[in-house]
Image (cartoon, coloured by chain):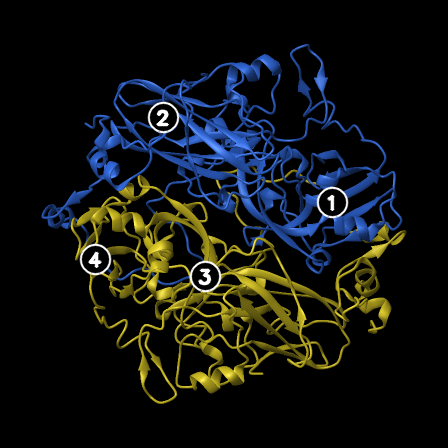
Chain colours: A yellow, B blue
Amino acid sequence: MITQDDDVVDRDGAGKRRLSRRNFIAASTGLAGSLVAGRAAADSLADVPPREVGADLSGRSERSQYVKISRIPEATPGKRNIDPSDAINSKTPLDKLFGSITPSDLHYERSHSGVPDLDPAKHRLLVHGMVKKPLVFNVEDLKAMPSISRTVFIECTGNGWENWKKADPDLTVQNTHGLVSTNEWTGVPLKFIVDLIGKERDSNWMLAEGGDAAGVARSIPLTDEILNEAFIAYGQNGEPLRPAHGFPMRLVMPGFEGNLNIKWLRRLKFGDRPWMTRWETARYTQLQADGKAEQFQLRMDTNSVITSPSGTMVIKPGYQRITGLAWSGHGKITRVEISTDGAKTWQDAQLNSPALPKAQSRFQMDWVWDGKPTKIVSRSTDDKGNLQPDRKSFIAVTGSNALFHYNAQQTWSIDETGRVRNVLD
Amino acid sequence: MITQDDDVVDRDGAGKRRLSRRNFIAASTGLAGSLVAGRAAADSLADVPPREVGADLSGRSERSQYVKISRIPEATPGKRNIDPSDAINSKTPLDKLFGSITPSDLHYERSHSGVPDLDPAKHRLLVHGMVKKPLVFNVEDLKAMPSISRTVFIECTGNGWENWKKADPDLTVQNTHGLVSTNEWTGVPLKFIVDLIGKERDSNWMLAEGGDAAGVARSIPLTDEILNEAFIAYGQNGEPLRPAHGFPMRLVMPGFEGNLNIKWLRRLKFGDRPWMTRWETARYTQLQADGKAEQFQLRMDTNSVITSPSGTMVIKPGYQRITGLAWSGHGKITRVEISTDGAKTWQDAQLNSPALPKAQSRFQMDWVWDGKPTKIVSRSTDDKGNLQPDRKSFIAVTGSNALFHYNAQQTWSIDETGRVRNVLD
C-alpha cells in the first residue's frame, strides 16, 4: 500500500498535486495490472499466447468477443430488467467509454413510440407557415445543400432524474448520467432553409414535428443563437443517421433539451407564437418549488460527472486515475475541479483538447488513495462563467418537485473496502 | 435544364461563384429530388406512409434496413470479388460517408495475417532495449496513465496504387482512395512511456512490433515531432479498439504511413539505429525512377479527393454539390481548390471547421453543370505550404516504378450522359 509521502504525492509550489513520472512509478505498485521491472519481464510475458493467424478481413469490423458493452433499456426511472416493449429510453455506458465521441450504436435513446425505420425514398420534410415560399424536401435535396459537421452533445432533459429525491447506492454512472452522448452530426444549417423559404419578419417561432407515431412536436423560439446553430442532420459519426437517432433526418439543437432535437423530422412550421403542443404543456414542463410549472426551460446547464472511479466499481489503495466528462449547453467547458475529500478542497483537473463548444469534454487527474473512506466529486465551469452547483444550492433554488434539468454535482463515496457508491452529497 | 446566366451563377466581385439562396432556388429544378413549392406540397406528401409504432428500444442501435454500406475486401490492387481468405485489405466507402469521422466498423483495414482477436487479460506490451528501466504493461496499466484523445487520419501507404500506371474508368472513390480513414483515438502519449522507462540519450530509434502472426515490425526515428505526437491507443471513436484496428492496443503515429501505426502492439524496443526488419527492406520501400529503393519515406503527403460526384455516379445537368475530403501528414489543410474544367481554372472550396491537424477535412462547393462533357479535380494545400501535385509533375518526380505515397490530384471525367469516370488527368 502506498503512503502519501512527498515522494509519491509530488506537490508543486502551489501545493497542487501534479502528475509526474516519479509519482506514477512510486504509486504504480498499487495498480491491478502487471507493471513489473527488469528481470520479471520474462515471467510476465510467459503467459502471452503464441501468435495465430487471425480471422478473414471483412466488410465491417465487429467488436472483440472480449468487449461487453451496451446500453441499458429502462421503463421509468429505476425500472430496469424490463420487457423490451416497455422501454422508453436506453442509457449510454459512460463508464466504459473513452475520449469524447459516443459510438453511434451506443448513443442514448429516448423515444415515445419505439424506433421507426422510415423509408428515405418516401420520407418528406414540409416547411411552411408564415413563410413566403413553402417547400417540401426529401433527404436527397438536403444532401445537395451546403452542409456543416459539428461535434455536440445531446442530452435528455431527464438526465439525472434518478437522484432527484434519493440516491440508490448501487447505481452506476450509466444509470445516473447515461442520457447524454456526443456525436459528430452532419446536415444543413437551419439558416439556409430559412433563407430558402423566406421566413416572414414576425415569424419568430418554429414548430418542429417528428414522423414517429407519437408525433413529438415542439415550439422553438428563433433566437439568433438558434438560427445560427441549429441544423437538420442526416449524418451521424460519418454515416447516415441510425433509426434510433432519427433516420433519415433530425433537427440538431446544440445546447438545448434532447426532446427539441426532433427525430424523424417531417415538418417545420413557422409562426409568431408557440403552438402549445402537449409536449410543452403536459410534458417537458418543470414543476417548481411553489407548485407552478415553468415552460420552455430549454437550455441544458453546466454539468459534469466522474466516470471512473464510479458507482459499483471497486478500487485498491494507491495510484488512481480519475476521469470523467463535462458539458454545458452554454458553450465551452473551461475548467473542471475535482474534490477527493467530499467537497472540502478542490484541485484543477486536466482538460483534454480540443474542448469544443456544447460537446462533452474529457477531464482527468491522478490521485493516490490512502485507503480511508472518502467521497469524490467534480464540478465544471463554462466559458459564460456558469459553475455547476452543489446539490444543496441546486435543491434550494429548484425544489424537489421537478423532474428535469438536474445538473447538481455528483458525489461518489468510497468505503474502506474500495467500493464506490452513488450518494447525494 | 439550367443555363449559366447571372441569375443562376451569382458571381461575387472577384468573379468567384458563391452559394446563395438565389442560385440554389433557380438551379434546384435540376435536382433529382422533390423540391416543390406551394400547392404542390400536398401532392408531394401524399405518398408519405402513415405513422407506425416503431421497434423496441435496444442495447445497441443498428443501421437502417435502407442503408447499404460496407467496405470492399481486396486481394491485390484491382482484385475484388475474391475469396475472403485472400483479402489483404478492405477499403472505406468514402462516397457514402459524411463529415470527417469514419465509423469504427468502416475504418479501412490492411493486414498481413488476418485479424486476431487477442485476449486483453493475457496481452502484454514489453518496453525494453536502451532504457534504464525495462517495463511490461497490460491494457489496464495503460488505462491508469494520463490519456489524450486525438482525431487523426490513418492512411495505408499504398492508398492510390490503383492509379499508378493506368486508370480503370469504372473505379469508385472507394476503390481509388478507400485506404484512408479518420477516427478519434484515445491512449497514452509515447512521451509518458519514454519518461517512465528512462530512455537513454543515444536511443533515438524505436522498434514497434505487432502481436499478429506476421509480426509486423517497424523502426521509427524518435524525432521531436514523433515523441510529442505518437501515442499508444486503446480507444477508437469512444469505444475499445476493434480487433481489425489493433485490439487491445496499437501505436498511433499521426501523419505517418499506416503500417507504422502498429496494431496488436506487443513490443517497443529502444536503440541507436534502425533494425532493418523485412517490413522496411523487402516491403514498404519505394522503388525510384532510377531503380534504387528509398527506405523510411514515412510521412503521408498532402492529398485530397472529390467524393461526390465521383466514379460510377451519374449526375444530371443543373445544380450540383461537389464535396470531398482533404488531408496532410504535414499538418492542417488550409485550402482546397476545385476545377470544373479539367484543371484550367480553379476556385476555392469551402472548408468545414474545425480543420484539425493530420485529420481529414471535409470540403464543398456548389456548381451548376451545363450538361457538356468536362473533368472535375481537387487540389489541397496544407499549413506548411505543400500543394498537392498534378499527376504529370508527380510522375516526373517519382517515376512510375513506385507503389507507395501516391498523392497526385484525382480527376473525374463527366460525359454528356452525366456518367462519372476515373481518369488519369
Of the residues tagged 2 and 1, which is closer to the observer? 2
Q: Earlier in the sequence, mark 3 or mark 2?
A: 3
**Label 2, label 1: how far apart the Cα atoms are:** 42 Å
Q: Chain of mark 3?
A: B
- Asked if residue B60 is positioned above or below residue A85 in the image, the reply reads above
Residue B265 is left or right of residue A248, and the answer is right
Residue tagged 2? B312
Image point (21%, 50%), residue name: A198
Residue A201 got which mark?
4
**On what subunit does the disc labeled 2 rest?**
B
Residue B421: image x %, image y %? 38, 21
- Of mark 1 and mark 3, the one earlier in the sequence is 3
Marks 3, 2 in one chain: yes
Query: Mark 2: which secondary structure?
Result: loop
For the point 54% across and 21% down, which residue is it? B389
Q: For mark 1, what is the residue?
A: B266
How far across and down, in percent of the image, does residue B322 sit?
A: 36, 33
Q: Mark 4 or mark 1, which is nearer to you?
A: 4
Label 4 marks a residue whose chain is A
Badge 1 sits on which subunit?
A: B
Q: Residues within 10 Å of mark 4 (few under 14, many from 20)?
A: few
Q: Crowdedness of circle 3 by 10 Å Cα count: few (<14), some, many (20+)?
A: some
Q: Secondary structure at mark 1?
A: strand
- The CA distance from mark 4 to mark 3 is 45 Å
Residue type, label 3: Gly
Residue wearing tag 3: B59
